[in-house]
């Protein structure tokens, strides 16, 4: 196991060392478990740690959080806690537990359990691995269900036959892991997935839980791959009964990916894009506006997220028609696009085909977006203009002139302001 731990960044090694110390002081055995251990073995980067504790995970978390000077968030019901470090790294800590499902597709009832019981409740063998965190002793990987063999063979295998009915969200996770790691879903597991989808178990889960799993899928590096597989298995009905991913959807999806990559490369300091939201809008493209409104309301998207999707579908076609015009003044481009979110503009750019439209959209990002004036209210005050509506009128005219290239620096802006102030005074004196 030491060879795997050597791969870790220094900060993660420090956290594990402190966790070993806390384990010794509290006499509570602690283990690296689940996804972080899986990714260590696969040599895949994963900066989050999952620790399972035989004893009281919340008490352990408080001790470790104090040592790390981390923010602690506690979830009493599930006997878990999350530590958030100043660097942004997260450590999830859980009491080893067993789960009982009061009914299919329901949230589990949890109670303390042994490490083996904790591993047994997990979704797939590749996530049912653990290794003891000790200060100076070499420990072998604890693997009661053959997870290491499945990692080597590239298999996603479920732990028991009722797994997808207990928690149908595991269907999306199985597909997500198989596409992310280029693993195959072993035959029996694939049969259980198909049966569960055909029996409608995905529709029986809370829409908000399905939303969270869908967002994780849309955040995958190559999100179209798991979506295609889910669509091929007939599993999109939990979003909307008539939803399909056809060739036009795939074309728009790839175009959106290209636009997202262009934005990220060229504007690294601007607000980070919610790429998953762009992809969600894309996969809804074949639905009517009423159906789209129903879907995003049922999924419980936040107001800002809903507005960004709906603004594209409510105004996108008209905006593209305007932006297709060749000789469009910069002030017009600015007035059309400035009220929109980055996500909506990226969707417009992915959807439009004309060179003129593409050029206007790129000019907005490269030149007009965030354009600021050199002059300020102090300059207007110095010319005897009192704060009020006149400020806004004059600044709007100067900004329009700057967008159109008629003023280019502070001197030319001041000259225009003086001219506009004189005109304004003359009008008021008449």
Image (cartoon, rainbow, N blue to C red):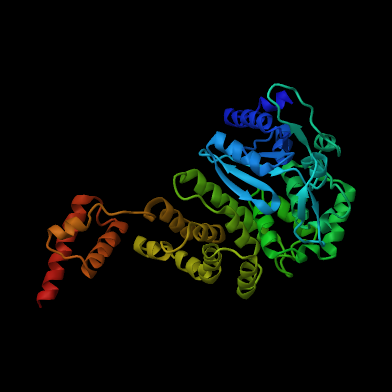
Residue drawn at point x = 61 percent, y = 30 percent:
18
Is residue 221 at least partly visible in the picture? Answer: no
Query: Residue 351: where, in percent of width, then height?
Result: 56, 61
Query: Residue 93: where, in percent of width, then height?
Result: 66, 42
Query: Residue 71: where, in percent of width, then height?
Result: 54, 43
- Residue at far bottom of view: 430
Count of marks placed on residues: 0
Quadrant into which the N terminus falls: top right
Residue 35 falls left or right of residue 233: left
Q: Identify whether 408 is placed above or below 237.
A: above
Residue drawn at point x = 66 percent, y = 30 percent:
25
Query: Residue 109: where, in percent of width, then height?
Result: 77, 56
Residue 244 falls left or right of residue 255: right
The residue lying toward the viewer, choosing from 35 and 352, is 35
Quadrant into which the C terminus falls: bottom left
- Residue 413 figure quarter: bottom left
The residue lying toward the viewer, choosing from 411 and 299, is 299
- Residue at far front of view: 26
Residue drawn at point x = 23 percent, y = 55 percent:
376
Q: Identify whether 21 is placed above or below 410.
A: above
Is residue 129 at least partly visible in the picture? Answer: yes
Residue 25 falls left or right of residue 338: right
- Residue 64 figure quarter: top right
The residue lying toward the viewer, choosing from 68 and 164, is 68
């Amino acid at each position: 196991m030491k060879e795997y731990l050597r791969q870790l960044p220094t900060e993660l090694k420090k956290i594990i060392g402190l966790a070993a110390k806390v384990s010794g002081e509290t006499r509570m055995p602690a283990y690296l478990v689940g996804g972080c251990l899986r990714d260590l073995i696969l040599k895949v980067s994963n900066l989050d740690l999952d620790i399972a504790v035989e004893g009281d995970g919340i008490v352990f978390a408080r001790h470790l959080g104090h040592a790390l000077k981390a923010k602690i968030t506690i979830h009493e019901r599930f006997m878990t806690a999350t530590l958030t470090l100043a660097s942004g790294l997260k450590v999830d800590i859980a009491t080893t537990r067993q789960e009982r499902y009061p009914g299919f597709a329901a949230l589990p009832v949890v109670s303390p359990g042994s490490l083996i019981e904790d591993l047994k409740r997990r979704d797939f063998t590749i996530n049912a691995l653990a290794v003891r965190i000790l200060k100076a002793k070499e420990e072998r990987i604890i693997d009661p269900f053959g997870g290491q063999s499945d990692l080597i063979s590239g298999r996603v295998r479920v732990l028991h036959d009722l797994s997808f009915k207990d928690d149908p969200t595991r269907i999306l996770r199985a597909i997500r892991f198989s596409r992310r790691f280029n693993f195959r879903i072993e035959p029996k597991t694939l049969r259980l997935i198909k049966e569960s989808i055909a029996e409608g178990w995905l529709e029986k889960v809370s829409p908000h839980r399905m939303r969270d799993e869908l967002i994780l899928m849309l955040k995958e590096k190559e999100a179209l791959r798991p979506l295609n597989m889910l669509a091929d298995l007939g599993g999109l009905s939990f979003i909307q009964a008539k939803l399909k991913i056809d060739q036009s959807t795939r074309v728009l999806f790839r175009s959106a990916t290209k636009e997202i990559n262009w934005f990220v490369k060229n504007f690294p300091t601007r607000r980070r894009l919610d790429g998953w939201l762009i992809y969600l809008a894309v996969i809804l493209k074949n639905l009517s506006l009423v159906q789209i409104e129903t879907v995003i309301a049922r999924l419980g998207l936040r107001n800002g997220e809903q507005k960004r999707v709906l603004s594209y579908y409510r105004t996108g076609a008209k905006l593209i028609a305007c932006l297709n015009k060749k000789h469009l003044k910069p002030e017009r481009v600015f007035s059309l696009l400035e009220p929109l979110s980055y996500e909506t503009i990226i969707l417009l750019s992915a959807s439009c085909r004309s060179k003129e439209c593409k050029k206007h959209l790129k000019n907005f990002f490269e030149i007009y977006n965030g354009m600021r004036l050199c002059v300020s209210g102090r300059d207007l005050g110095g010319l005897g203009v009192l704060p009020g509506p006149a400020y806004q009128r004059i600044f709007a005219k100067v900004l329009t002139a700057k967008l159109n290239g008629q003023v280019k620096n502070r001197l030319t802006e001041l000259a225009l302001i003086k001219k506009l102030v004189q005109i304004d005074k003359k009008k008021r004196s008449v």
